[in-house]
Image: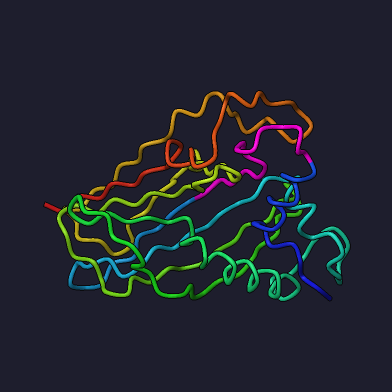
Amino acid sequence: MLYRFVFLIIVTACLFAGSERADAHPHVWVTMTEELLYAPDGSVTGVRHAWTFDDMFSAFATEGIEQKTKGTFTREELAPLAKVNVESLKDYGYFTYARVDGKRHKDVFLDPVDYYLDYDPKDTVLTLHFTLPFKVPVKAKALELEVYDPEFFIDFGFAEKDPVRLVSAPTQCTATIAKPNDGNFPSSLRLDQAFQTSEANAGMGASFANKISVTCP
């Protein structure tokens, strides 16, 4: 079976399908929880993502996947889809950007590990789990992570409950989050609702970045 439902490909397909609408509006919604992983020496070794996709995308992505139990999917059944997703994310920097002591760093992550997809049959949504190890563990007074899609085809947002955790961090380290002011693009909007082209421009995604700031005095 051809697992063509990589979410970036789907987003592009949706974009062309709705060509009368604005180019740079979200077509997929992701609710995320994040964990920063610490080593015993106090350095950050990686970022563990858990991204839950909206129900419309989840239904599209799972269409055609064989299932042993109707109405749900096992991790094993979703494994090929998970693999294609994380491999495709590499070309987009995993939508994850890092600043160390105020300085922006590029290409700081290794390929994802421990990746898999979960399916929630009650809410009918997919959640992609994956860990991004830092190439070199980060030990700094200030670490900032941003998660966003530069083209704003995908709208990321923090979960309401426990959006960020510091795992095994030194006791003096603290984390704060900053949410984008995206009131013009609530998650209730979907492809069947019209957008005005003046509302967004390609490359505007950075304005809707979700920020995690960690300080370790």
Prevailing secondary structure of the magenta residues: loop
Q: Is 63 left or right of 53, judged from the image as shown? A: right
The residue segment tinted magenta is 18-32
Q: Is 205 left or right of 186, judged from the image as shown? A: left
Of residue 74 and residue 56, the one placed in the foreground of this image is 56
Quarter that holds the N terminus: bottom right
Q: Residue furthest left?
A: 217
Of residue 206 and residue 65, the one placed in the foreground of this image is 206
Determine the residue positioned at 66% across, 23% down.
196
Residue 182 drawn at (x, y percent): 50, 29
Residue 147 drawn at (x, y percent): 44, 50
Q: Is residue 147 magenta?
A: no
Determine the residue positioned at 29% across, 64% down.
168
Determine the residue positioned at 53% across, 57% down.
50
- The image quadrant that residue 105 belongs to is bottom left
Picture layout, residue 32 above or below residue 61: above
Picture layout, residue 59 above or below residue 41: above
Determine the residue positioned at 64% across, 27% down.
197
Of residue 197 and residue 191, the one placed in the foreground of this image is 197
Residue 146 drawn at (x, y percent): 38, 49
Of residue 184 and residue 55, the one placed in the foreground of this image is 184
- Counting every numbered tag in the picture gives 0
Residue 100 drawn at (x, y percent): 22, 57
- The image quadrant that residue 26 belongs to is top right
Q: Is 131 left or right of 211, judged from the image as shown? A: right
- The image quadrant that residue 127 belongs to is bottom right
Q: Is 138 left or right of 211, judged from the image as shown? A: left
Image colouring: rainbow
